[in-house]
Image (cartoon, rainbow, N blue to C red):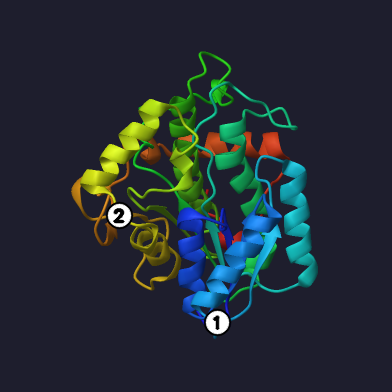
């Protein structure tokens, strides 16, 4: 990764921090994006301490729940004019007890996990296309197996349930990652990755049953964030990945082990649904990614 520039969302802790550290250790210049400036500063310091000879690592404020923040972050990077080699869409919100709306009027979990990353990727496409071999790695989840994704209730207005909202957002992300590849076949490489089970801050703010379930999974299937991040790093850097591929851990239930290609859940094979979600995401965010005409395959 020497000489390359990478952006990792949610890079101040957990899997994002482990991913950013792995990229920095491989020689990449890394931008870790997150909401808290102090946590970003401390994360960058930790990475520099671990890899003192690494390329520059810096934190940049980004709130994916705010379309204005996404636009501002993308404008700052664009203003520097540096081609972007890698974007890792990692940040996520798991649990909010009550349905919460963002400043844009979107439901918080869907706004952060899917719409924020959709808009961020779209706004960074010009920088990505300036790199010789750009790649987007989107972190999904084995929970992304809902039989259908109801686009008429994307904002979870009917019968809001936190975990259901999370599953819907991760399903949307998987559909997005695959549709991105179809729309820019030769312009960039888009892959989806599921890192498996890792003990991260994502679970600490949920209700007791969720925290208890995660502790149980950790005892049986869990591993540290560095091991889990290996799946993300594989999708983000390996020359062996297939554009439009989906990768997960090879062990039991895809929760631990070495990276391997994974079968797509049925909902992710619905190209019409992915196209409709893309168009709806464009309409909601006002971001319409464009690619060279020779690369289009819609």
In percent of the image, x 48 and y 20: which residue is there? 161
The residue that mark 1 highlights is 54
Residue at the bottom extreme of this rendering:
53
Q: Neighbour class for label 2 at 10 Å: few (<14), some, many (≥20)?
A: some
CA gap between label 1 and label 2 equals 26 Å
On screen, residue 72 versus residue 56, left or right, reads right
Asked where in the image residue 61 lies, by quadrant, the reply is: bottom right
Q: Position of residue 137 (x, y in %)?
A: 48, 58
Residue sitting nearer the eye, 39 or 113:
39
Q: Position of residue 100 (x, y in %)?
A: 63, 25
Q: Position of residue 199 (x, y in %)?
A: 38, 48
Q: Neighbour class for label 1 at 10 Å: few (<14), some, many (≥20)?
A: many
Q: Is residue 83 above or below residue 228?
A: below
In percent of the image, x 54 and y 14: which residue is there? 158
Mark 1 lies on a secondary structure that is loop
The residue that mark 2 highlights is 223
Residue sitting nearer the eye, 137 or 52:
52
Residue 257: numbered disc: none
Is residue 291 at all visible to an observer of this figure?
Answer: no
Mark 2 lies on a secondary structure that is loop
On screen, residue 232 versus residue 158, left or right, reads left
């Amino acid at each position: 990764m020497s000489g390359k520039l990478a952006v990792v969302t949610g890079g101040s802790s957990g899997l994002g921090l482990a991913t950013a550290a792995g990229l920095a250790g491989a020689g990449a210049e890394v931008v870790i994006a997150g909401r808290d400036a102090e946590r970003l500063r401390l994360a960058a310091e930790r990475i520099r301490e671990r890899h003192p000879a690494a390329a520059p690592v810096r934190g940049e404020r980004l709130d994916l729940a705010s379309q204005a923040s996404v636009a501002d972050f993308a404008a700052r990077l664009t203003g520097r004019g540096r081609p972007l080699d890698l974007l890792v869409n990692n940040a996520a919100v798991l649990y909010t007890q009550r349905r919460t709306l963002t400043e844009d009027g979107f439901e918080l979990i869907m706004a952060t996990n899917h719409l924020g990353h959709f808009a961020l990727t779209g706004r960074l496409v010009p920088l990505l296309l300036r790199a010789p071999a750009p790649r987007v790695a989107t972190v999904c989840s084995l929970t992304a197996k809902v039989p259908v994704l109801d686009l008429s209730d994307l904002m979870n207005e009917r019968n809001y349930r936190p975990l259901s909202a999370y599953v819907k957002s991760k399903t949307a992300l998987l559909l997005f990652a695959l549709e991105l590849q179809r729309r820019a076949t030769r312009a960039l490489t888009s892959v989806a990755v599921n890192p498996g089970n890792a003990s991260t801050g994502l679970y600490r703010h949920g209700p007791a049953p969720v925290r208890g379930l995660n502790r149980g999974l950790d005892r049986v299937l869990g591993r540290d964030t560095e091991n889990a991040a290996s799946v993300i790093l594989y999708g983000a850097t390996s020359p062996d990945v297939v554009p439009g591929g989906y990768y997960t851990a090879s062990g039991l239930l895809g929760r631990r082990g070495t990276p391997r290609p994974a079968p797509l859940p049925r909902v992710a094979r619905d190209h019409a649904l992915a196209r409709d979600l893309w168009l709806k995401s464009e309409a909601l965010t006002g971001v319409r990614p464009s690619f060279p005409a020779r690369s289009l395959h819609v």
